Every structure is written in structure tokens, then in C-alpha cells.
């Protein structure tokens, strides 16, 4: 016996169709389940990424070219522990390259450890150190393995989060800035958001006597988010005319090279860059995180004692960094592009 | 009895029952989302800094991430606050008003000098100044 259409629509053959309201109920139930599961899923993803980064970071510490590896997982205390297993540096002792949290005024430091304040911090997996831009800096007192010359190769990598990009905020430096005719620098990096259009360019570096700036980066990065910065210097040979060692400077933001820079030394020869770098070695100028080293005799003559030749008397910290840092590494080799990209990939949120 | 009849009649009507169920489930979904929003803790940002009002010179310590954010105003007069700086020579404390510096193709010393000029003490003209510390 043939059934009519009306029999189907009424479910006469037990082939009932779902109504719109019933479908909506199912959708809402799925949404409820997803809303309940989402935090756990995000936490699991963050934990997996953190664990992968942590293993990678420990592996980097075994590289004989890795002189400094701060992973900022202490979460408290006055010392950044260097976790390198042992670098290929004469007389290397890991503890000599620990970082000491200091105050430019000489008193108790005003650093703030932010537990769960680093990458993946929302899910409780990464600590970070907050630099206040007023008086905080980290001192690495031993210079032997960090005194790079133009004939060396080296790479510096860090994860930072600027409170706000402003001119001169210096995440790291090994420098002795002074005057147009007397300034020394081995390497530093600072923010320069006013180069080109605001937010473009954004970072300048000094390596020996070269000051490099970029007017545009072609690299997208979130200004207020975590940024992976890498500075690489690769010795390329000796200039036959001058006899000076030459090298190639590269800066990477979030694993991507910034490309050719404007060499302000050539573009603007009448103004000042670093006039040398050997003074940093002779005066045992330490590497610092969170500021730029400067000559006290030029920058604060009222506090300078010409009869004293201690480091504290010769050197002071300016251009303090405002923001967080949660990883810092120094290698005494030029990492290839792919390895720098790998550092970024392993550490990105 | 009357109420039970109303409920029985309501529950017996499949369309009404489904709509009631949908509304209840929507309520549960909204509740979950509301609890998540209310429990969300913003990660701690910025540092404690000494700031000084650019207008009335009121001095205070405030958690600052970006000094240019509109909420960074003086509780006394409602005007914008700025980072507090101090002159090493005359001891004068003042708000540092940041300006944009054209730094195109300048070298580090020039840029740093330009920043120092911006930080110059308005009282004695010295560039030997530093940010005020909270202690």
C-alpha cells in the first residue's frame, strides 16, 4: 500500500525529522561542552608548548658555543642562574656568568619577578622579570667569554615584551657611550620606534663601530606582545685597504631577518657612532641586561672622581629598559638563519 | 493543583517544552561564559613608578605600563601625569614630558644625546638627571 507525502511529514513511518528548536538545543549543548572544555584544552596546549620549549632550552645549554643561557624560571631571588653546561671558553665556570639583579642607585633592587608573567604565563607556565625603566638592571660581571672582537662570531637572542616602544630602551648592551669623539661599544640593541613611520623599523643595533638602523622592517610583530629579538655578527674577512676586520650584522625579529639596514656611519659621517670598542675590554665593561653602559665622566661629571679607576666610577647605566624579559642567550658563533628561526618557533606562544 | 495543571499542560506541549529547554540551556551557556569573564585575571603589566602631575606637580607612586594611556591622570586635578625625574645637580624633581624625536638616519650617540636633551632639568639646565626611584 502506497503512503502519501503527508504520512512522511507526520512521521507516519517513524522517519521523524528534527525541528529547528531541537537542532538549536543540540547546538547549544555542544557549545556548553566546548565552553567547559576550552580552558582545559588551552591549558594543555600551553603546557605542551612550554614543555617543548623547556626541553629545547635545556638542549641549547649543552651547546659548547652557548656562553649564557638565562631561562628566567627562578621566579624569585636576586640572581639569574646561567644553566649552560659548559661553554668552550678558557677557564669557563657556569656560575661566573650568572646575572645579578641590581639597582642603579646602589640599594636594594626594585625588580619584580612575575610568576606566570612570561610566555604562556596566562596558564601558569613561565616566569618573567619585570624591568621598571627607572633603576633596574642585570649585571653579568664576568667578561672573559663575552668580550667579542670584530674577528669573532656571536649571536645574542632574547624574548622581551616592551611596556611601550620608546626611543633608547635598551634590553642589553656591552658599551661605554660618551661623546662624539670618545665612545666604545661591543654590542647593544635598543628600541627606536621613531625611525621612519612610528612602529616601523623599531630597533637599532650597535656592533663595534657600526650603528645600524631600519626604516621599515617588513616583519609584522605585535608591539605590545612578546617579541623574539636576535642580533648576529659574522666575521667575513679583513679589509685589505685598512687592515681592519669586517663582519656582517643581522637582526631578526620573530625569527625573520630585517634585511639590509641603513648604515648611519656611512649615511651621516659628520655625526657620532662608537669610535671604538677596545675600551670596553680594557675597562672590563660588563654585559648588562636592561640598560646601556655610559662613561660617568661625560654623563655625570658631578659624581665622577678622576682619581679613582674603579668600574663603578668609570661607568654608569642609562637608557633603562621598561618591560619584561623571559629568556636570554649568548652564543659565541653565528647561528644560521634556520637556527634563529628554530629558536623563535620553539619559543613562540 | 492549579500550578501542577499548568505545568502538566505546558510539559505536554512538545513545542513549548523544547523552547523552555532551549532557554534553560542558553542560560547555562551564558552563565558559564559570564563566570569565565568574571574570573579572568589580566596578567600583571607595567611597573611601580614615581609619577608627577604635569599641572599641579602632585607626586605619587603608580603602576604604569604605558604613561600615555588615558587613565594615567592626576587624582587631584585630573590632568595627565608623567614619569618623575630628578636632577643630580640641583635636586629638582619634575615631570618628564616625552616628545617625539626625529631620529632618521642618526647614529646612536646623536639619538642618546637627543634623549638626554629631552630629559634636561628645567630648573638648572643640567643633563645629569635620572628617573625617580620608588625607594
Image (spheres, coloured by chain):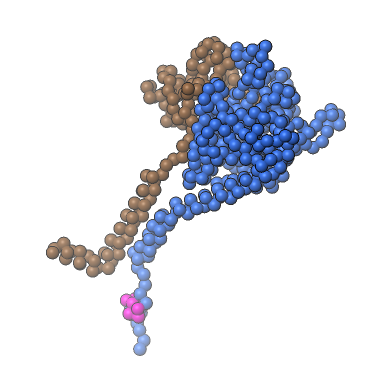
Chain colours: A blue, B brown
Q: A186 or B4, which lies in front? A: A186
Quadrant location, the N terminus of chain A: bottom left
- Above or below, B98 relative to B125: below
Residue at the bottom extreme? A1
Residue displayed at 50% across by 13% down? B92
Task: Give the quarter of the image for residue A177.
Answer: top right
Q: Measuring from the top left, give residue A349's x and y in whole percent.
A: 55, 46
Q: Is A181 situated left or right of B66 in this image? A: right
Residue displayed at 45% across by 21% down? B52
Residue displayed at 32% across by 54% down? B27
Q: Is A114 situated left or right of A155 in this image? A: left
Residue at the right extreme? A240
Q: Magenta stretch containing residue A331, yes or no?
A: no
- Above or below, A44 relative to B51: below
Residue displayed at 30% across by 58% down? B24
Q: Measuring from the top left, give residue A142's x and y in whole percent.
A: 67, 30
Q: Measuring from the top left, give residue A89's x and y in whole percent.
A: 73, 36
Q: Is residue A173 visible?
A: no
Q: Which residues are magenta?
A: A9-14
Task: Give the quarter of the image for residue A220.
Answer: top right
Q: B94 or A234, which lies in front? A: A234
- Above or below, A57 relative to A139: below
- Above or below, B114 relative to A216: above
Q: A14 or A2, which lies in front? A: A14
Amino acid at each position: 500500500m502506497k503512503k502519501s507525502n503527508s504520512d512522511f511529514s507526520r512521521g507516519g513511518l517513524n522517519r521523524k525529522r528534527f525541528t529547528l528548536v531541537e537542532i538549536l538545543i543540540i547546538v547549544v549543548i555542544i557549545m556548553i561542552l566546548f565552553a567547559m572544555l576550552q580552558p582545559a584544552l588551552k591549558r594543555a596546549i600551553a603546557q605542551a608548548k612550554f614543555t617543548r620549549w623547556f626541553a629545547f632550552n635545556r638542549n641549547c645549554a649543552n651547546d659548547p658555543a652557548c656562553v649564557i643561557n638565562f631561562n628566567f624560571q627562578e621566579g624569585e631571588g636576586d640572581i639569574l642562574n646561567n644553566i649552560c653546561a659548559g661553554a668552550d671558553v678558557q677557564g669557563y665556570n657556569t656560575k661566573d656568568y650568572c646575572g645579578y639583579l641590581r639597582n642603579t642607585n646602589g640599594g636594594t633592587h626594585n625588580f619584580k619577578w612575575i610568576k606566570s608573567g612570561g610566555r604562556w604565563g596566562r596558564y601558569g607556565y613561565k616566569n618573567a622579570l619585570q624591568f621598571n625603566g627607572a633603576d633596574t638592571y642585570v649585571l653579568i660581571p664576568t667578561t672573559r667569554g663575552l668580550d667579542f672582537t670584530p674577528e669573532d662570531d656571536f649571536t645574542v637572542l632574547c624574548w622581551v615584551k616592551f611596556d611601550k616602544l620608546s626611543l633608547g630602551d635598551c634590553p642589553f648592551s656591552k658599551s661605554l657611550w660618551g661623546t662624539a669623539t670618545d665612545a666604545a661599544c661591543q654590542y647593544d640593541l635598543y628600541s627606536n620606534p621613531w625611525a621612519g613611520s612610528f612602529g616601523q623599523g623599531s630597533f637599532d643595533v650597535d656592533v663595534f663601530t657600526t650603528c645600524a638602523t631600519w626604516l621599515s622592517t617588513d616583519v609584522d610583530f605585535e608591539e605590545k606582545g612578546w617579541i623574539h629579538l636576535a642580533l648576529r655578527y659574522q666575521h667575513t674577512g679583513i679589509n685589505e685597504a685598512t687592515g681592519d676586520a669586517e663582519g656582517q650584522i643581522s637582526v631578526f625579529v620573530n625569527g625573520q631577518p630585517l634585511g639590509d639596514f641603513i648604515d648611519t656611519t656611512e649615511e651621516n659621517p659628520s655625526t657620532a657612532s662608537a669610535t671604538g670598542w677596545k675600551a670596553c675590554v680594557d675597562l672590563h665593561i660588563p654585559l648588562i641586561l636592561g640598560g646601556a653602559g655610559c662613561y660617568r665622566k661625560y654623563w655625570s661629571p658631578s659624581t665622577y672622581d678622576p682619581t679613582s679607576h674603579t668600574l663603578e666610577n668609570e661607568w654608569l647605566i642609562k637608557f633603562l629598559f621598561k618591560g619584561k624579559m623571559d629568556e636570554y642567550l649568548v652564543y659565541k658563533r653565528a647561528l644560521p638563519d634556520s637556527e634563529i628561526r628554530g629558536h623563535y618557533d620553539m619559543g613562540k606562544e | 493543583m492549579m500550578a501542577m495543571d499548568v505545568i502538566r499542560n505546558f510539559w505536554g506541549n512538545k513545542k513549548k517544552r523544547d523552547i523552555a529547554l532551549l532557554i534553560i540551556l542558553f542560560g547555562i551557556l551564558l552563565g558559564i561564559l559570564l563566570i569565565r569573564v568574571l574570573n579572568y585575571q589580566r596578567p600583571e603589566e607595567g611597573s611601580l613608578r614615581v609619577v608627577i602631575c604635569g599641572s599641579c606637580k602632585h607626586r605619587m607612586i603608580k603602576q604604569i605600563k604605558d604613561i600615555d594611556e588615558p587613565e594615567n591622570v592626576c587624582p587631584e586635578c585630573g590632568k595627565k601625569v608623567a614619569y618623575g625625574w630628578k636632577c643630580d645637580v640641583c635636586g629638582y624633581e619634575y615631570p618628564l614630558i616625552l616628545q617625539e624625536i626625529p631620529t632618521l638616519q642618526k647614529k646612536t650617540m646623536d639619538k642618546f644625546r637627543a634623549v638626554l636633551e629631552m630629559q634636561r632639568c628645567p630648573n638648572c639646565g643640567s643633563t645629569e638627571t635620572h628617573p625617580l626611584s620608588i625607594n
